Image (spheres, coloured by chain):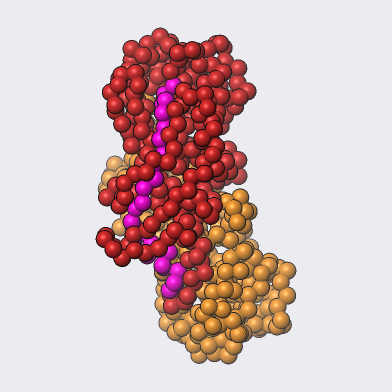
Chain colours: A orange, B red
Amino acid sequence: MTSRDYYFDSYAHFGIHEEMLKDEVRTLTYRNAMYHNKHVFKDKIVLDVGSGTGILCMFAANAGAKHVYGIECSSISEYSEKIIKSNHLHNVITIFKGKVEEVELPVEKVDIIISEWMGYCLFYESMLNTVIFARDKWLKPGGLMFPDRATLYVVAIEDRQYKDFKIHWWENVYGFDMSCIRNVAIKEPLVDMVDSKQVVTNACLLKEVDIYNREARGPVLHLSLPSADPPQRLRPRPGHLFQHRVHQVSQEDRLLHSSRCCHHTLEADSVLPRGLFDCQEGRGDFWQYRCQAK
Amino acid sequence: MTSRDYYFDSYAHFGIHEEMLKDEVRTLTYRNAMYHNKHVFKDKIVLDVGSGTGILCMFAANAGAKHVYGIECSSISEYSEKIIKSNHLHNVITIFKGKVEEVELPVEKVDIIISEWMGYCLFYESMLNTVIFARDKWLKPGGLMFPDRATLYVVAIEDRQYKDFKIHWWENVYGFDMSCIRNVAIKEPLVDMVDSKQVVTNACLLKEVDIYNREARGPVLHLSLPSADPPQRLRPRPGHLFQHRVHQVSQEDRLLHSSRCCHHTLEADSVLPRGLFDCQEGRGDFWQYRCQAK
């Protein structure tokens, strides 16, 4: 494949899967949810929506599933089939390459649907609707969704170093004033890791989705996040942007009432120019944000 | 502009210019070449091929040029005009937006051509031919090129950490064998900074280009590097790849015979699978390379 192919099939490149797999909080939470609930998975038919490298399928298989079906529309599916075979799980796992909306499964219904559908800013990958589609089509009455609840929070952080290096830097570039680029740079969304020590406000609940809810689709679309545009970049929209937003997916094991909680610390952020100013009080530079979820 | 626009006009995004400007070795070398040779620039007509943010135009203006023309085909030209105006140099600098091959300059000939045409692996941006075109069309007999000579070296480095984290990592992903992706990952080219302490061989001269040479075009094309494909990624080609190659552009000031030498440490690298093996001698992991410039 060439870089041009990857542009139109960005999930075909292993790099994006490497990044997801190396997010240990995320991956280990899925693994724990399955390995610590083997009685739930034992002899069940499991469907993985967007199976990628096949990691969740293999977790489900090792947790005792009778059979796992994975659906993956990008070319990474070919590698996942090799991986599954290398790990001697090809009798338990079957991967279907194609769109969830078009694939025909060899079973009428499944007991459990697993999916890692969360993207930047929780909803960015626009994949939740596909998971809901799969739920409505294949999930048995009383079947289980993993995860079953997702919440999006917004917090503010301070980051003077970033601001100096990426924003104020344009004010004096080898002695020249390039402030007009500063004004563009400050509007540029950024997806980055932040240290928890940088958080300077409480977390504000922005959106909660019950994946079992038949109306789950509605409130998500009301967030008006950009739809799936191939490059992994959010576009700023005046009046609906946040500075250094951290989203957290809380996963609660309803079955076992273990109240295990995973903080999924991917961040997506944008600057709302009108709401951005320096405040000299308190802890140095403080970037205020305004959130207007519509 | 949206991310889709940037795909087709990648130089329009300020980020790539920020990266270039923040390469202080590169930018300061250009500045020094002009500021330390003001007697050469005084009252001269200067052309900047691919003027970007206008930084080299402004250096030339400050070095005493009578007038500087900048040609830039991407939309960053609009910002460069604002920048030039903000710095009160709009009477000395004129930016033309368009392709070098199509732009009409208001002068017949120029005294000096400056250009920052070097890309990853020196020739990657495929811009040298455009500079040569500009030279043949506009440079006065006896006129000057900045830079006037470019050399590409190849060296080998060792980087066990990278190898463990990006290559061997696939052999055991949460207990699963994903080696088939390792085999793809190892072929992936990488552009990265390396520490000079990682270099474990002498530098091997691969290609030298005299920019005044009328045949400069020839040997460059013989390197068979990929032509300008929008994404900033080299594609691996069996038999013509290097592991952790560092290229260095040596700039020698011919005029002043100062023998100032700038090491331009952008790196481009790819793995030649046939030539890649672990050698336990000497300093730990050692990745051998084979270079076959054709």
Q: Between residues B30 and A256, which one lies in front from this camera angle?
A: B30
Residue B169 on the magenta segment = yes
In this rendering, is residue A222 above or below B204? below
Name the image quarter holding the N terminus of chain A. Answer: bottom right
Left or right of residue B151: residue A119: right
Whether residue A65 can be seen here:
yes
- Vertical comparison of A174 with A8: above or below: above
Q: Is residue B15 magenta?
A: no
Quarter of the image for residue A280 reads: top left
Question: Which residue: 56% across, 11% down?
Answer: B108
Q: Where is residue B77? Give x, y as percent.
A: 53, 27
Give the magenta part as a residue range: B145-173
Q: Which residue is at the front of the view, A203 or B158?
A: B158
Residue B65 screen position, x and y as percent = 41, 13
Could you tell me which residue is drawn at 54 percent across and 70 percent down?
Answer: A53
Residue drawn at (52%, 21%), measured in percent from left and top?
A: B135
**Residue B102 relative to residue B116: left or right:** right
Q: Is residue A56 above or below residue B161?
A: below
Give coordinates of residue A160: x percent, y percent: 32, 45
Name the spot of residue A264 as percent of width and height, x first.
Answer: 43, 66
Q: Quadrant of residue A259?
A: bottom left
Q: In front: A165, or A80? A: A80
Q: Residue at x 56, y 24 (%)?
A: B133
